[in-house]
Structure formats: C-alpha cells, structure tokens
Image (tube, rainbow, N blue to C red):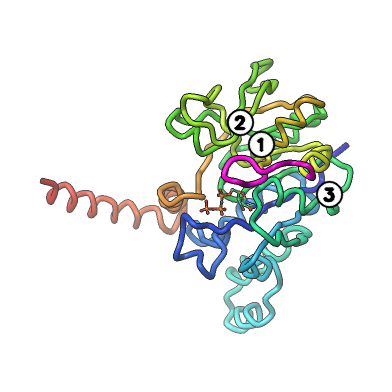
Amino acid sequence: MKVKKAIIPAPGLGTRFLPATKAMPKEMLPIVDKPTIQYIVEEAVESGIEDIIIVTGKGKRAIEDHFDNSFELEQNLMEKGKYELLNEVQKSSKLVDIHYIRQKEPRGLGHAIWCARKFIGDEPFAVLLGDDIVSADTPCLKQLINQYERYNATILGVQAVPDKDVYRYGIVEGKRIGERFYTVNSLIEKPNREEAPSNLAILGRYILSPKIFGILGLQEPGAGGEIQLTDAIATLNEYEAVYAYDFEGTRYDVGEKMGFIKTTLEFALKHKDLRSQLLDYFSTVLEKELINRP
Ligand code: UTP
C-alpha cells in the first residue's frame, strides 16, 4: 500500500526556547525567513505525501494561520506590486491539504501520534518531527518511502550521533543487512551512554505500520513519564519486522538553541542575497574577537 498520509506532531511546549515560545509555537521560529515547520511540510510534499495532519496543542493557532490564506496581507502586497513576496505568502497556503487535531494534554509523542489514528485509518503512514530539518538531494522522507516500497514494513530514519549525545534520542540496535539498511533488534528511548546499545539515533522520520495505534492505546508512560513512540515501536517489533535506514543528507537539529543558531547561519550562507554580507560580518567579528582574546 502506498504511503500517502503524514503526521507532524507539534504540540510540544518548546521549553528550550523560552521565553520566545511563551506565546509563539516553536515550530514558527524562522530559519532565515521561513518557519521551521514549513521546511518539514515542504519535505513531505516533495516526498509525495498527499494529506498531512498536524497535531497541535494549546497556543499553536499561528501554525494554522500560517498555512491558511491571508486575504488582507495578500491584497496589500498586490496593491503595492510586491509580487515576489505575494508568491511566497501564497505558497504556504497552497502546498498540500493540511488537517489539524489537538493533543489536549502533553502526554508524550506516542500519545500525540495516537491522537491522529482516526485520520490515518488502516494504512501505513509517515511521521516527521519538526526538530530535525534534513537537507538532501533526495528528500529524507522520500528515501524512507523508497525503502518502504521494497520491504512493506516499518522503517525508522536513523543516523549516527556522537556517543555523548545518545541520551537525547531513541537509539536502535540493529544488524546491517544492506547498504545503509538494518534490521532492528532492540530500541531504547533516551538511554545513558553506558546502556546505549549503539549510537544509531532515530532522527525524526518514520514510516509506521497502522498496527502501532493498537499498541499506543495500551502503552504505559516511559522515559520522562511520557507515552513514548520508541517504546511502542519496540513492542511492534515483537510482532512485525522493523527496519532502520541510515538516510543520506545533512541533519540540522533545530530543537535546541545551539543547533538552531548553527542552522540559521548555514542557511543564511546558502542564501544568495545574504552570503557575502554574512561573510564580511564574520570576518569583522572574528578579527575583533581575536584581538580582544586574552
Ligand atoms: P521535545 O522533547 O522536543 O519537546 O519533543 P518539546 O516540548 O517539543 O520541546 P522542549 O524539549 O520542551 O524544548 C519531541 C517531539 O515530540 C512532540 C514534540 O512536538 C516534538 O515534535 N511531543 C512532545 C508531542 O507530540 N507531545 C508531547 O506531549 C510532547
């Protein structure tokens, strides 16, 4: 069966960006001039996804407004002849069919996915987390869908992370059976360095079998007292094969401050109008910092 639907969970509180996220969703923080969630929606569309459900929560209305028409703004840009900007503004509302559902309490990622079960029904589906933006020749999700079409089974997008960072991720232990491809033996959410079975981390991209919903419905809270998607996938693995694919591309971590700053700088360096100004600025700053360094 083809993968046509995707869930983008976005109900998280974004505590790592407080106070910026007190009244604004973290998914709306811009990388240069585009909210992070738009990069994610664009990746889904470029991967062939036809319907997206965004799981929102309290204080997330700005996300819905962003992907909606904005009549007054569009009228204003048209009257002023700002057609390029008008095009950009209209683009976000024309991308794809987006549906919304609210997670009423922050009970964890697994619970947020479970909230979308009626929208997905009995078909395989994709999950994309907004904390990871991937820059790749073939969109990251498309790479996973290509693998799904060969294996017809749950596939997790993974990459190796430094050992010191394993505690931040769901970690898989697998057996390599092909180029970039693993069968998953076990999974553990946010292990400490000693208990981590490997450094292959699940990085915010999944193709999941709909059987996961039945498991999530019975799932007890795990790490951090939250209903963890990784725990449910571990249970699923007892009944069905689960694979991991080490996707190609550069992963940008926009869910924490330093990652967000690095991503902003790297994307600005790729921007044709900003690159040379930014390089000039860097050299001035570096010169000043080096002179002042004791
Ligand atoms: P994070 O651990 O990054 O939490 O969630 P957060 O609230 O988004 O951000 P911080 O850590 O407070 O700064 C990882 C993913 O799980 C989703 C988030 O939306 C994010 O995509 N999530 C988290 C849920 O869907 N529901 C929850 O109850 C919690």
The image shows residue 71 at horizontal and vertical percentages of 69, 79
- Residue at 88 percent across and 36 percent down: it is 1
Residue for badge 2: 188
Mark seen at residue 230: 1
Residue span colored magenta: 217-227
Element under label 2? strand
Answer with mark 3 or mark 1, whichever residue precedes in sequence: 3
Element under label 1? helix
Q: Residue furthest left?
A: 294
Work out how far the residue at label 3 is from the one at label 2, CA to CA, in angstroms. 26 Å
Q: Mark 1: give few (<14), some (14-19) or many (20+) Cα within 10 Å.
A: many
Q: Amino acid at mark 3?
A: Ile
Closer to us: mark 3 or mark 2? 2
Q: Is residue 45 visible?
A: no
- Residue at 12 percent across and 49 percent down: it is 291
Q: Nearer the viewer, residue 89 or 27?
A: 27
Closer to us: mark 3 or mark 1? 1
The image shows residue 196 at horizontal and vertical percentages of 53, 26
Q: Amino acid at mark 2?
A: Ile
Residue for badge 3: 120
Q: Nearer the viewer, residue 70 or 160?
A: 160
- Residue at 62 percent across and 72 percent down: it is 86
Answer with mark 1 or mark 2, whichever residue precedes in sequence: 2
Queried whether the magenta region covers residue 226, the answer comes back as yes
Q: Nearer the viewer, residue 81 or 97?
A: 97
Q: Is residue 184 visible?
A: yes
The image shows residue 143 at horizontal and vertical percentages of 69, 34
